[in-house]
Image: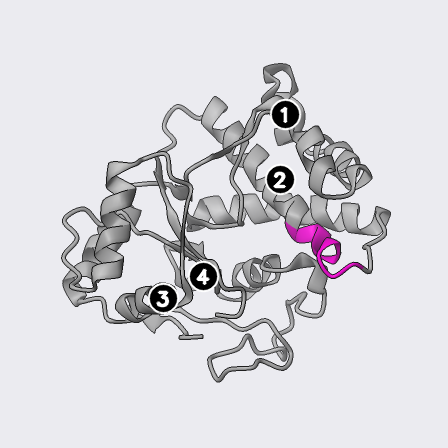
Amino acid sequence: MIPLDNGPFYALHMQRAPSVACPRLPVERPEHILERASYCEIRGHHYVWKNLLHRFDYVGFQHYRRVMIWPTGNFTNPDPVLRQLHAETVRYSSFQALTIDRESFLSCLRALNALTSGEVERLRAVAGAHDAILPYRTGRNVPPDEHYAGAHVREHFDVLMEEMLKEPFFARLRPLTPFQQYWDYFGNLFVLRAELFDDYMSMSMPVLERVAARIVIPDDPYQSRAMGFLAERLFTFYMYGLELTCDTLRVRHTSFALSEDTNV
């Protein structure tokens, strides 16, 4: 893997024994949930929220296999892969993910590490003009509970809904029926204004903690990531709720590149 470490990007490792040399989240910090593997990338979200948020106006997250195609306007990076991905995102505005091979994905990472100061400033300008930059919505043909049950443990979703509706924000939304939308924001990928990120984490972490206390995390390697899967749904409900109730919310959508190789 090529760690992103340039301008606005910083690579974070949440594994206890990383296979590559790149910066890791130090476990000596007092506020972390790094040992709770079921939370997946939410461990990084939590760490930044508790320890680093005061440093930033905006925070965002992408993954070792998923890199957002940043909507920077007049894109000039010479890397052909990154230029093509940017062009495809502009041309086909409904693409949620663009799957590419390992070498193309690594080329994409190298190009992001080589962004010029002008490109970094354009990226900052785009972020600063919005409250949230999100991946395009992923559509589905069944309600969220049925969709979750098709790939995961249905009871976990039911518990999430029960605990989520205890929060005043979500309870107020119930008459608007935002919980039956036929799309999701998958991946726990986003860029949020710092105040909005703080609001989301302040609301979501108590919900997830209550859910974790009530469910049994499966031993299956895939299903053991239950808290990460549930967080995707919680983030979807949160953002959709904001979109329904906040007329001034400024949201921009974009695609992301997905490596078809799980061992990037």
Q: Mark 1 sits on what residue?
A: 142
- The image shows residue 203 at horizontal and vertical percentages of 62, 43
The amino acid type found where label 2 is placed reads Leu
- The image shows residue 217 at horizontal and vertical percentages of 81, 55
Q: Say which mark, if any, is on residue 234.
A: 2
- Going from the N terminus, do you reach mark 4 or mark 3 first? 3
The main secondary structure of the magenta stretch is helix
Q: Mark 4 sits on what residue?
A: 54
The amino acid type found where label 3 is placed reads Phe
Q: Mark 3 sits on what residue?
A: 9
Mark 1 and mark 4: Cα distance apart in space? 40 Å
Residue 219 lies in the magenta-colored region? no
Q: Residue furthest top?
A: 175
Label 2 SS: helix
In the rendered structure, the answer to whether residue 255 lies left or right of residue 129 reads right
Dot in front, 1 or 4: 1
The amino acid type found where label 4 is placed reads His
- Going from the N terminus, do you reach mark 2 or mark 3 first? 3
Label 4 SS: helix
Q: Where 142 falls versus 197 (above or below)? A: above
Classify residue 105 by image quadrant: bottom left
For disc 4, the neighbor class at 10 Å (few under 14, some 14 to 19, many from 20) is few
Q: Of residues 29 and 191, which is closer to you in this image?
A: 191
Mark 2 and mark 3: Cα distance apart in space? 25 Å
Residues shaded magenta: 220-228
**Would you say the residues marked 1 and 4 are in contact, meaning their CB atoms lie under 8 Å apart?**
no
Which residue is at 78% across, 42% downward?
Answer: 153
Question: Count of labels shown?
Answer: 4
Mark 4 and mark 2: Cα distance apart in space? 24 Å
Q: Where 22 falls versus 137 (above or below)? A: below
